Amino acid sequence: MTTPPTVPLAPIVEGQRRNRSWLLMYGVCCLVTFLDGFDFQILSFAATYLKKDFDLTGTQLGTLGTVGLFGTMIGALIMGYLADRIGRRPTIIVSVVGFGGFMLAFAYADTYAHLFALRIASGIFLGGVLPLTWALAAEYAPKRFRATGVAIIMVGYTLGGAAGGPVSNWLIPEHGWRSVFVLGGACSLLTVVAIWLFVPESVRFLALRARPGSDERIAGILRRLQPGLSLAPGTRFVTGDPQEAAASTGFRPSALFRGPLAAITPLLWSVYLLSSALIYFMVFWTPMINERMGFSVSAAATIAAAASVAGALGQLAISRFVDRKGAGVILWMPLAAAACMLTLGLGALVPAMYVAFIISAKMFVNGGHGGITSIASTFYPTAVRANGAAWASSVAKIGAMVGPWLGGVLLDTGMGARGAFTVFALCPVLMIVLLFGLGRAQRRLPPDAEGALATEPPPGPVPAPRPVTQP
């Protein structure tokens, strides 16, 4: 009897080319993160109306932002654990159904206690989406495109947050603040259909778990994503990395600090925490700071949306350099961000100059943040990749909670917008040092390690899979 061939997946993934099914998968993931960003950040655009309807203090309003972030921190850990146990695809579906449902419920809240509880609940599911889509994108992208692929997913989140301004201006004056939460929740629930149809499970995850029927599922997914691929009947699949099998026995947090990760994980967590503190300060307070600068509510929301779009462009711009040059190249974004933040803090700017610098600051802040998130899942093996991304995301939420709170404290103590921008300029300054260290650590990785710099792409068409020689 002929033994079915055993084929490693790594060469297939590295040699693949983009096609319709592959682009559809990334497009749906981008749509999911768009809705995740919209549903989470719409609170900052509806904040003025919520404060009026519920007679909230500034502290109560800031608390709603903070408890939502606390929910995302807990949710990222829970969903990351589930994704490494039952799979990326089902956990993404659970997360989208959860945050879509609780967003709808938020629209019908009638007390502050309801708002508080529903914000935590929706945050738990919102927090699971980003690290899971990063993990899925990283496991389907060749190394030469990995940071860009994850950055594209993150751009969806940024644009979703940016859409909150125009959508709020369009719906709230006519239909009230509840309408934007209804829209976000309903669209999120409808997106589950697209996930079910176009987002496959990670083939690396399926090969690692090796459950009954996994090989047939992998073959079906590969034929759909790479129509020209020839696979023999009964082919068995392995990840192609001996370290993966060793890591698949179960997850412990210590797995995130083994070998080279002992240096990489603390650097990654620290820079991610600082970046999150900075970006969430800007996301939460910039619309209201714009109002304090004399802009109308509508104009303030439009400026914040334009700044987010500029940030998405910054993310895409840096990602291609990250794929080629590594994590160290990201430091140019916080360097430019620090200059913009200090200009906003130290200079008395006329309105036109203020708008130009706030948009530039957001572009560089978002660009740096997007670069960091694009590498957050790439250093970890498949067996713990979702957990690695989730733990990084959860640690970063500490900064994300501190950022809005500290911004409120600085504004309430009389330092004003200029003082807040000056203090928060310290974040990108520290990020520059940490990213330099992270880049050095990445360059010391062996070529076959996860997160190592990509080699040149293989020439020609996708190579036929080569069976593993059996002893």
Image: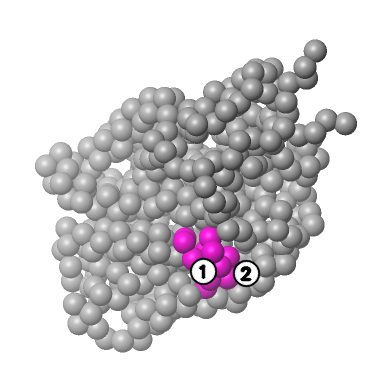
For the residues labelled 1 and 2, the Cα–Cα distance comes to 9 Å
The residue that label 2 is drawn on is 439
SS at badge 1? helix
The answer to whether one can see residue 290 in this image is yes
Q: Quadrant of residue 116?
A: top left
Dot 1 amino acid type: Ile
Specify start and end residues of the magenta stretch as a single range: 319-331
Q: Residue furthest bottom?
A: 347
- Label 2 crowd (10 A; few <14 / some 14-19 / many >=20): many
Could you say which quadrant of the image residue 96 lies in? top left
The percent coordinates of residue 93 (x first, y second) are 48, 29
Residue 174 position (above or below residue 185): below
- For the point 18% across and 68% down, the residue is 295
| Labelled disc at residue 95 | none
Nearest the viewer among 276 and 468 is: 468
Within 10 Å of disc 1 (Cα), the crowding (few <14, some 14-19, many 20+) is many
> Where residue 134 appears, x then y in whole percent?
52, 46
* Residue 200 horizontal side relative to residue 42, left or right: right
Relative to 184, is 174 on the left or the right? left
**C-beta proximity under 8 Å, tags 1 and 2:** yes
Q: Position of residue 178 (x, y in %)?
A: 25, 38
Q: Earlier in the sequence, mark 1 or mark 2?
A: 1
* In the image, residue 206 above or below residue 351: above
Q: Amino acid at mark 2?
A: Gly
